[in-house]
Image (tube, rainbow, N blue to C red):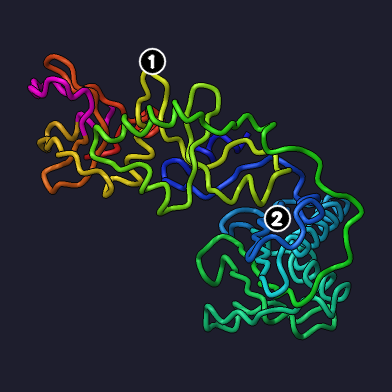
Amino acid sequence: RRLPALIANLAGWGATHTAVTCLPGEQIGGMLPERFDVVLVDAPCSAESLRFSRAPRQVSERERQALVDRQCRLLESALRAAKPGGVVIYATCTACPDENEGVIDSILRRYPEQTSLRDLTVIDHPSARGLDRYNNPALTRCMRLWPHVFDTEAFFTAVLEKHAALPPAAFSMQGEFGHSGYQRLAEKDGQQAIHAFADLGCDLPALLDAYALSLWRRREHVFVLPDQLPADFPALVVQQAGLLLARAAGDDLLPSVEFVSRFEHHFAAPRLTISNAELRVWLRGGDLRRDVGRPGKSLALLADADQRFVGLGKISAGRVRNLLPSHWFKNNPQMIA
């Protein structure tokens, strides 16, 4: 249920070198051993003492033990996925020592030769140190934020450095990247995309080469994917990858606002400058009532009075149609004052 929000956020940021998958985290290390420089484990936790202003959440011993067991499996999986010389970041939003220092201590004792704790001195405050428990003083290298001390929610984090490979897991990855629905774009369709972006003053082949991206189709949409994704992760089945380049609009391709927004400095087409009053309408999703008078140019890059890019519009008689994605503003009517 969190995937749509994650995918929308990545698109809004213009992230290109990403792949979103939905697999048990406990299996990732065995599926993709020693592939990553950095792995973040944002572990499910009890959220105990999350906020100082509220009564503490009651957590049963059975629930806590189940969480600790899973947290250990997730952290071990992350260590398997990291390259030797890489780092694993473990984080929770609970104050419970068993789910924090206890999990770290368990992994350090299980793999003493393969991993060690990096000392975190981000905050120079004695209360920010990890608790000296479990007969392991190294745990003070962790960091924890107490709500009543730092006026935050409860937070714990530790950074583990991986020095050597862990024993191999008992399973390997099964699947095929092509089963995710992505297929390399045919040359004819690729030329269509190139021409669509050339009309906006963008040299698409040069841009793709500069960022190590290639063109792929998924249903009626065209995406840019990092070259290394299908090459280095051929067995990874993903929910979404790369960044949307264009949507099919009949026989044409309509460049995506997400892509243009991310790479607008690569577009040489003149901007259509709009007033502050028009900007308020535009950023709430409204069309502009304006006769642009640009026959033969169906798309325009819009800019505010300071020449900042604010979106892509489709020009028709007496109107500039708003092409901003609806989810950018439909839940935020106060997007602009």
Q: In the shown orientation, is residue 271 left or right of residue 205? A: left
Residue 303 vs residue 97, the one in the foreground: 303
Residue 15 vs residue 69, the one in the foreground: 15
Tell me what residue is drawn at x 30 percent, y 27 percent: 323
Establish if 143 lies above or below 10.
below
Inspect the image, locate mark 2, and give the three-letter code of the amino acid beneath it.
Answer: Ala
Quadrant housing the C terminus: top left
Tell me what residue is drawn at x 15 percent, y 42 percent: 304
Residue furthest right in the image: 170
Q: Which residues are magenta?
A: 281-300
Which image quarter: residue 90?
A: bottom right
Q: Mark 1 or 2 closer to N-term?
A: 2
Inspect the image, locate mark 1, and give the three-letter code of the amino acid beneath it.
Answer: Asp
Q: How many other residues sit within 10 Å of disc 2, few (<14), some (14-19) or many (≥20)?
A: many
Residue 282: mark: none
Q: How many other residues sit within 10 Å of disc 1, few (<14), some (14-19) or many (≥20)?
A: few
Which image quarter: residue 279?
A: top left
Task: Measuring from the top left, give residue 223's x and y in whole percent.
Answer: 48, 35
Residue 43: mark: 2
Task: Measuring from the top left, give residue 130's x and y in whole percent.
Answer: 68, 77
Q: Is residue 77 visible?
A: yes
Q: Alpha-carbon distance for marks 1 and 2?
A: 46 Å
Task: Measuring from the top left, give residue 55's x and y in whole percent.
Answer: 65, 53
Q: Is residue 287 visible?
A: no
Q: Predominant secondary structure in magenta?
A: loop
Establish if 303 lies above or below 39.
above
Give the residue at mark 1. Answer: 251
Secondary structure of the residue carrying numbered label 2:
loop
Secondary structure of the residue carrying numbered label 1:
loop
Task: Measuring from the top left, give residue 198's x and y in whole percent.
Answer: 27, 35
Residue 224 vs residue 328, the one in the foreground: 224
